[in-house]
Amino acid sequence: MQQIIFFFIRNKNFLLFFALFLIALSFTIQSNSYHASSFVNSANFMSGGVYSARSSVSDYFGLETQNQKLTEENAYLRSQVTKLQNISETTLDTTITDAPYFFMAAKVINNNYGNTKNSITINKGVRDSVKVDQGVITSQGLVGIVNNMSEGFATVQSILNTNSEINAKLKKTNHFGTLAWNTKNPNVVQLKQIPRLAPLVLGDTIVTGGRSTIFPEGVLIGTIIDFELTQDDSYIVDVQLFNDMTNLKQVYLITNTQARKILQLEQATEDAEQ
Amino acid sequence: MQNSEIFQNIIRFIGLALLQVLVLNHINFLGYINPYLYILFVMLFPFTGNKTLLIFLGFFLGLTIDIFSDTGGVHAAATVFIAYIRPAILKFSFGISYEYNVIKLNKVATNERLLYISAMVILHHLVLFLLETFNISHILLALKSTLFSSIFSIILIFSVLILWGRKR
């Protein structure tokens, strides 16, 4: 017994190091699995507070470009409204249901893009009824998916994260693929598993596929700048993002109001098949 | 440790952590190269101080950086590693006598200081980037990041030490 105690005392530094290293390693492994939201994240009270304090200062430096972006978006939305007004004058439909998607504005308070697994911190949390797996976009295109949150803040797993896999398609021909990132360039992502038959042209637009309940169909992603045929007879396409991922300020969170119904239905079908 | 030394270390811990997460994590030189200055805390911790305490503090410093930069536990792992291995590196760079003589980092010969800083930085960055990529097929990327970030960090830490050393 005494020997065991002596052994512990003699090796206490190594044992302590080993225990703490294992804890750190388990945090790392946890953060690498997609579905488990990680315990260590920047959506907490402390880091969220520090980041929003910083962003309340640094925001002033980018006001002009942010203004420019919002004005452009306003102009686009105005043109959409006039289009819709023309339609609604001629049709009288009393059975219009609620809009399937609901958008909420949020502000980016911290943005990483230099690592292989990047994430973004935003200033909306449980208090604003943010939920895990909500899609996040800007006026120009796709940003990522919410993965952790606290009372007042949430973290978003950016598309610039090797764990991200988002369903996307060619706008012209509806060929589906999976969007991933090879860590090389923060403004270029890769679209994989595009079938060989798909007619690819440089400059074609890539949009979200709408096969999941996270993003609506047709959210802009980017344009094709390069493609290559792999050995398993499918294309890997380099996509230049419309978004500048290194300069994000205003984002929108998407709530799919019918997500629960769709998921319930899918669950019921799965149960029935078993 | 004396009271003034404890106080100095607390200030250094908080100051370096804030500097790292608010400024240095956002440099992204050439797209992905960031210096990691916060390990200066582990390097400057009193050479004759309590080793167990240093391992604890290293872990919490790393964890703080992890919380702010959403990286799981990679900084905690890398920092606790260099905190544990520091006595061996001290012996390697300053010779066996470091335990008996009172050595100040800004008083030793430049080549010994450079050796100490480089060994600590490279070991830290190697563990950091290997865990961060967490993928055998991306090992080349991890080594490349280690090389470039190490150069950046070593230059920064060396200049900070020169600037601080001159004041006293």
Image (cartoon, rainbow, N blue to C red):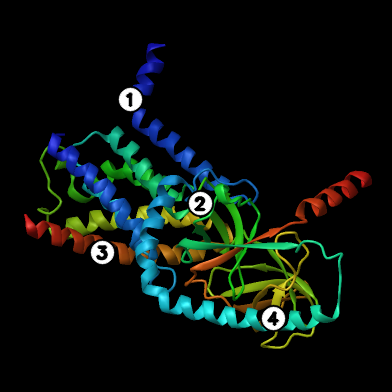
Place of residue B103 in the rendered image (x, y in percent of width and height, measured from the top left):
12, 45
Do the CB atoms of the residues marked 2 and 1 lie less than 8 Å apart?
no
Do the CB atoms of the residues marked 2 and 4 lie less than 8 Å apart?
no
Q: Nearer the viewer, residue A210 or A131?
A: A131
Q: Residues within 10 Å of mark 3 (few under 14, many from 20)?
A: some
Instruction: Classify residue B162 as left or right of residue A158.
Output: left
Q: Is residue A243 above or below residue B58?
A: below
Which amino acid, mark 2? Phe
- For disc 1, the marked residue is A10
Q: Quadrant of the N terminus of chain A?
A: top left
**Closer to the eye: label 3 or 1:** 3
Whole-Å distance between the Cαs marked 3 and 2? 33 Å
Which amino acid, mark 4? Gln
Chain letter of disc 2?
A: A
Q: Residues within 10 Å of mark 4 (few under 14, many from 20)?
A: few
Whole-Å distance between the Cαs marked 3 and 4? 52 Å
Q: Residue furthest left?
A: B168
- Residue A223 can be seen, yes or no: no
Place of residue A105 in the rendered image (x, y in percent of width and height, measured from the top left):
56, 63
- For disc 3, the marked residue is B156
